Image (cartoon, rainbow, N blue to C red):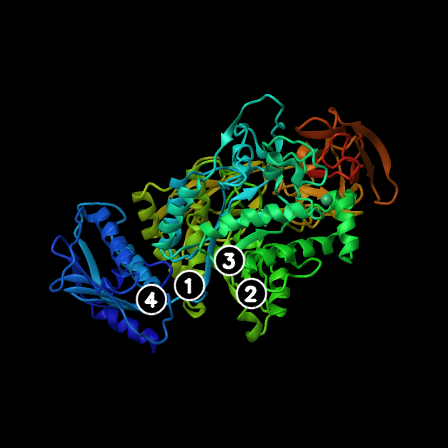
Amino acid sequence: MKQYFFTLLLLMGFNNLFAQEPAIIPKPVSLKIESGVFVLDASTGIRADLKQTGVAPVVDFLRASLKNISGVSMPNKTAGKAIVLQLAKLDEIGQEGYLMQVATNSITIQANANAGLIYGIQTLLQTLPAIRTNAVMQIPCMQIKDYPRFQYRGMHLDVSRHFFGPDLVKQYIDLLASYKMNRFHWHLVDDQGWRLEIKKYPALTQVGAWRVDYTDQVWGNRPQAKTGEPATYGGYYTQEQVKEIIAYAAQRNVTIVPEIEMPGHVASAIAAYPLLSCNKQFQLPMTGGNYTNISSNYCAGNDSVYQFIDNVLDEVVKLFPSTYIHLGGDEVDKDPWKKCAVCQAKIARENLKDENGLQSYFMKRVEGLLKKRNRKMIGWDEILEGGLAPDATVMSWRGEAGGIEAAKMKHQVVMTPGKPVYFDHYQAGPEGEPVAIGGMNTLKMVYDYEPIPKELSTTEAAYVMGAQANLWTEFITTASMVQYMVLPRMLALSEVLWTPKSEKNWDAFNQRLPQQFKAFGQRGLNYSAGNFAVEIKPYAEKGKLFVTLSTEINDAKIWYTTDGSEPNLQSQLYTGPISVQSTQWIKAKLSVNNSIKGLQAAKQYFSMHQAVGKSVIYVKPYSKYYPAAGANTLTDGVRGTDAIGKNWHGFTDGDLIATIDLGEAKQVQTIALGCLQHYKDWIFLPAAVQFEVSTDGTNFTLLGNIPSPVSIEEKSVMHDFKIKAPATPIRFIRVSAKNNLCPKGHSGEGKPGWIFADELVVE
Ligand code: ACM
Ligand code: ZN
């Protein structure tokens, strides 16, 4: 029936009309195109009842937005061609929904509240150019009915690890609002910087907001500050700036949820006021990720700490109108509390079970400080440990388990699982991408996210208020990088959170995306075309190596080369697995509608040798955290690179012992095992690699032990442990390597390190 209907429309020549359908993201609940267009020009006015509460700022927002793109400040008009904003009593669409009717002489936006009017305006703005152009501004006549699926649609920004000034913060809020996100989680406090002016405690920003500038060095490798070095990197927001940003957000229906992190992640506060910690020792502001000898917790036994927090929160709630105040609560290293007499006395006096009990006591006590001010606490899912505070809302980041547990306990939940909504993770590559913290959350993974876990009943699911993406900035140092990591993944999340589940469609979303890319370009925003990347995946079958090429775009064609040249529409068209038989590059790009997409080709170098495609048997399995390409990663012809998450098999629980069977006795020249050292990531070269060979798989002959050429103190090394093979043919090869303990002075001193191996090269 549906098929027939569309065919009929096409025959009737309506296809042009459908092609005009504006590419709105998130997709509205319903949008019906009608014939005709509204032309936005200098004769257009604005009509609204300015006496209605809150309507005037909405009109200002509309007028300013239209002036940006038309150059005209449209006047209030009581008759004639106009954009009409009306508050009304409407069923079904709630407080954030709107109805929009575009006719040839009027655009009418109706809503129950200002929020809905604002979202109607955002939809309208998406039908227009993003900047001033000479184009005639036509909007197709249409009817839209629209409202959100979830009430909490959040984006987070960490301004502690790197500081971003008020202009970037406003731009970020503006972007959120353009896609109908309504919460900005402002991560104002962390170890590496306190960013909010607190008048009662000026040292929090005079000291805690400034550090020695090592921005040119990778986060984890930065030296610690030394006394006397100038602290020149940083910044903070004055309370006046914060007020202005809050007003800016409010005009766009964005509520700012400030995060005042505690009781961990507060090394910056302790640098300012050492008495807040357990050991009360002076420390310099952190420069990056080196925690050696750093206190990053408040002393949870010390009552004057709670007095300090009470005073800080007093200023916070006076500034921020948000009902929710985020108190952090994540990743508290409980060791200092174990060693602190004051904390232990508190545990005894309050009859707490242990340090988890102490964290729970801490969060409950601070929740009380919010409650007396009629505010609510939200915190990361660690606040469940030791017992959840009575009315706390849980932000589930370590997967969804915390959120599920809290919803079952009838607590409100915001879902923000690392996979797929940590936007500091890669979205493509990692080859060719700016260095990120790790992980991989592609656009499609975000689009496919469903915030309601299957584990919840309908009643329990009602506690899931929505979801949020987090942008931690250890590896993000500029405004341009912030944009790049968020665009376009935020658009996928906005559709997850706004559009009815039944209306979501990946292919249709991709068709609407280029229009948004155009708007990003017009606005000078840096964005990723990363989902137009091709994934190159090797696999072995019957001892032979094959490669599959895939993409997240369904209607794409993939073109590839094997001679190192750039692929184009004349290259080989991918139709199925490619057999790799010699050392070669595979480079691939995709096309949509006969146009090549994406900025650079996906590429992979394959090194052919006698073990490629052969099975690997381990005595102890590789870590589930470093599976690389699966079981036969050591023999897939793909060499590990500096990207530690990608091609390496990692071993930490015991030693590496791997055997391969070449299938038949073969003449071999050399055998080599590639290994990686990354000091800061606890990855060390083994002291030596032992090589053994056999013809029957039972009786092995020792070929020799090849020692490491460098000490484990060396920061970053890639090395092939290589040995000459015997003169006679061999069939089985066994390699063994002993794991190191982290050396003296290392942040993991005395704990087991890691071996990272790839590849086992037999020539
Ligand atoms: C977090 O990512 N530590 C909440
Ligand atoms: Zn203590």
Residue 748 appears anywhere in the view: yes
- Residue receiving disc 2: 412
Q: CA distance from mark 4 to mark 3?
A: 21 Å
**In which quadrant of the rendered view does residue 389 lie?**
bottom right
Q: CA distance from mark 2 to mark 1?
A: 19 Å
Q: CA distance from mark 1 to mark 3?
A: 21 Å
Of pointers 2 and 1, the one earlier in the residue sequence: 2
Q: Amino acid at mark 3?
A: Tyr
**Do labels 4 and 3 touch, CB within 8 Å?**
no
In the displayed structure, does residue 688 sit left or right of residue 35?
Answer: right
The circle on residue 498 is 1
Q: Amino acid at mark 4?
A: Ala
In front of the other: 566 or 297: 297
Ligand 1 neighbours mark 2 (CB distance < 8 Å): no
Q: Amino acid at mark 2?
A: Gln
Label 3 packing within 10 angstroms: few (<14), some (14-19), many (20+): many
- Residue receiving disc 3: 324
Label 3 residue SS: strand
Estimate the x, y position of residue 54 in percent, counting from the top left: 30, 61
Label 2 residue SS: loop
Estimate the x, y position of residue 534 in percent, counting from the top left: 48, 47
**In which quadrant of the rendered view does residue 610 lie?**
top right
**Do labels 2 and 3 touch, CB within 8 Å?**
no
Of pointers 2 and 4, the one earlier in the residue sequence: 4
**Do labels 1 and 3 touch, CB within 8 Å?**
no
- Residue receiving disc 4: 113
Mark 4, mark 1: which one is toward the viewer? 4
Ligand 1 neighbours mark 3 (CB distance < 8 Å): no
Q: Residue furthest bottom?
A: 1
In front of the other: 176 or 333: 333
**Do labels 2 and 4 touch, CB within 8 Å?**
no
